[in-house]
């Protein structure tokens, strides 16, 4: 109805997306004036005519037209021709990938977890997924001369796994010459913005404010640990449709933010063991129900949350860890630009470290995980 009223008054309506006013090229004074009148987005402004703005903002007709022109140019940009070479050159000039600290994985991904993409870490409990999240957060806060993004990290913690002392331990073990003083450690911890999540609905309610947080705090990376816990604890099996709707909204918004601000987004998912039932029975795979294909019961492992969530994931990394052996297996199982690969790792004070001495061997207890996790859908 609001769009219809805008058309009736001759106002312009955004058809290419709703943008924050701070992304519309307006002066801070103009943004403050618009927000004081509860005009907080491009849609709020473009649904008005120039005369409406004159009356509401007490500005001249020329100034009102300049505001509309500036916002319109950002919302409905002209399509520009480009080439693959120009795209590659732009990427080289503005690298925003965040390193993981695992050299083989970073090399395979051409520098680390790509900006503008969503990366998923998936594995069973105790497979060092949260350790990897802390490690990514550490590298994102580092200055660029140390291979970091020199910015802040928005860290959503759903399982209360975030530990500031562990982050400090990793930093001091990996960069002993840098993190020697309290001020530098305070600067490190001050760059990680932690938000405790209680439910998937809680995360959904925070989505509208994420863009403002990114702009105000210079956020260069987003981490969500653990999206599967939020989804599977809030909704029962018979609420699958509602859960998928909310998951789709969250995934779509996170991917849009990653693309719009060219930042890497890292999410954590669970690997779930599922048991087949008799032919014609129903098998719950954590996020959807599918018909069991065979008659005999069989065990399998798959990523939770189902194919709709997986559709939004650009890169998937699976992890499995054997505590008794002190070794784990990391596999790159999905990437738009890198082939599948695997490496052995261990957990140490410096975090998740590549086990170069075990490059060709895999602990026997991890072999079942290798075949199961390499082909997660």
Image (spheres, rainbow, N blue to C red):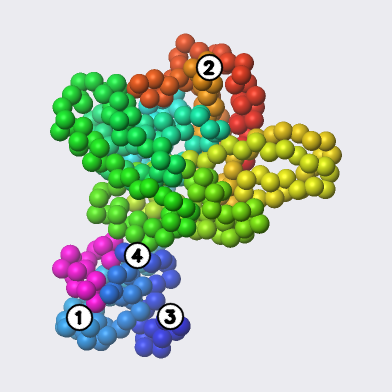
Residue 40 position by quadrant: bottom left
Decide: is 156 above or below 31: above
Q: CA distance from mark 3 to mark 1?
A: 21 Å
Q: Is residue 69 magenta?
A: no
| Residue 15 in sight | yes
Q: Nearer the viewer, mark 2 or mark 4?
A: 2
Foreground residue, 360 or 286? 286
Calculate the distance from the C-alpha at mark 2 to the C-alpha at mark 4. 51 Å
In the displayed orientation, state which residue is furthest to the bottom. Answer: 8
Mark 3 Cα-neighbour bin, 10 Å: few <14, some 14–19, many ≥20: some
Is disc 4 in contact with disc 1, using a CB cutoff of under 8 Å?
no
Q: Residues under labels 4 and 3: Cα distance?
A: 16 Å
Where is 332 relative to 286, above or below? above
- Disc marking residue 324: 2
User: Which badge, 3 or 2, comes first in the chain's sequence?
Assistant: 3
Residue shown at the point (35%, 56%) measured from the top left: 210
Q: Position of residue 237 (x, y in %)?
A: 64, 53
- Residue 325 at what x, y percent from top left? 52, 15
Image mark for residue 57: 1
Q: Distance of mark 4 from mark 1, alpha carbons?
A: 20 Å
The answer to whether residue 161 is left or right of residue 33 is: right
The circle drawn on residue 19 is 4
Viewer-nearest of discs 2 and 1: 2
Looking at the rendered structure, the secondary structure element under dot 1 is helix
Q: Which residue is mark 3?
A: 3
| Circle 2 SS class | loop
Q: Earlier in the sequence, mark 2 or mark 4?
A: 4
Identity of the residue drawn at 20% across and 80% down: 57
Label located before the other in sequence (4 or 1): 4
């Amino acid at each position: 109805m609001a769009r219809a009223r805008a058309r009736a008054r001759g106002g312009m309506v955004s058809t290419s997306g709703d943008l924050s006013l701070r992304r519309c090229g307006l002066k801070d004074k103009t943004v403050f004036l618009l927000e004081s009148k509860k005009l907080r987005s491009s849609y709020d402004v473009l649904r008005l005519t120039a005369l409406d703005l004159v009356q509401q903002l007490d500005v001249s007709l020329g100034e009102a037209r300049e505001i509309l022109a500036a916002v319109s140019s950002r919302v409905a940009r002209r399509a520009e021709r480009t080439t693959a070479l120009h795209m590659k050159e732009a990427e080289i000039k503005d690298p925003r990938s965040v390193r993981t600290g695992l050299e083989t994985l970073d090399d395979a991904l051409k520098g680390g977890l790509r900006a503008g993409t969503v990366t998923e870490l998936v594995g069973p409990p105790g497979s060092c997924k949260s350790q990897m999240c802390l490690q990514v957060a550490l590298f994102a806060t580092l200055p660029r001369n140390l291979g970091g993004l020199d910015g802040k990290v928005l860290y959503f913690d759903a399982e209360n796994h975030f530990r500031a002392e562990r982050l400090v331990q990793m930093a001091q073990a990996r960069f002993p010459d840098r993190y020697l003083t309290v001020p530098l450690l305070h600067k490190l911890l001050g760059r990680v913005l932690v938000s405790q999540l209680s439910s998937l609905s809680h995360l959904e309610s925070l989505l509208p404010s994420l863009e403002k947080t990114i702009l105000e705090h210079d956020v260069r990376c987003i981490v969500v640990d653990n999206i599967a816990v939020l989804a599977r604890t809030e909704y029962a099996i018979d609420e699958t449709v509602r859960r998928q709707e909310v998951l789709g909204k969250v995934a779509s918004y996170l991917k849009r933010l990653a693309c719009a601000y060219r930042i890497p987004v890292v999410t954590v998912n669970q690997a779930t063991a599922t048991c087949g039932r008799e032919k014609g029975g129903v098998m719950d795979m954590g996020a959807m129900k599918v018909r069991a294909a065979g008659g005999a019961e069989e065990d399998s492992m798959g990523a939770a949350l189902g194919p709709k969530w997986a559709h939004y994931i650009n890169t998937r990394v699976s992890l499995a860890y054997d505590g008794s052996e002190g070794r784990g297996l990391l596999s790159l199982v999905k990437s738009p630009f890198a082939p599948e690969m695997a490496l052995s790792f261990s957990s140490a004070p410096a975090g998740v470290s590549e086990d170069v001495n075990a490059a060709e061997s895999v602990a026997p207890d991890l072999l079942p995980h290798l075949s199961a996790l390499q082909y997660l859908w």
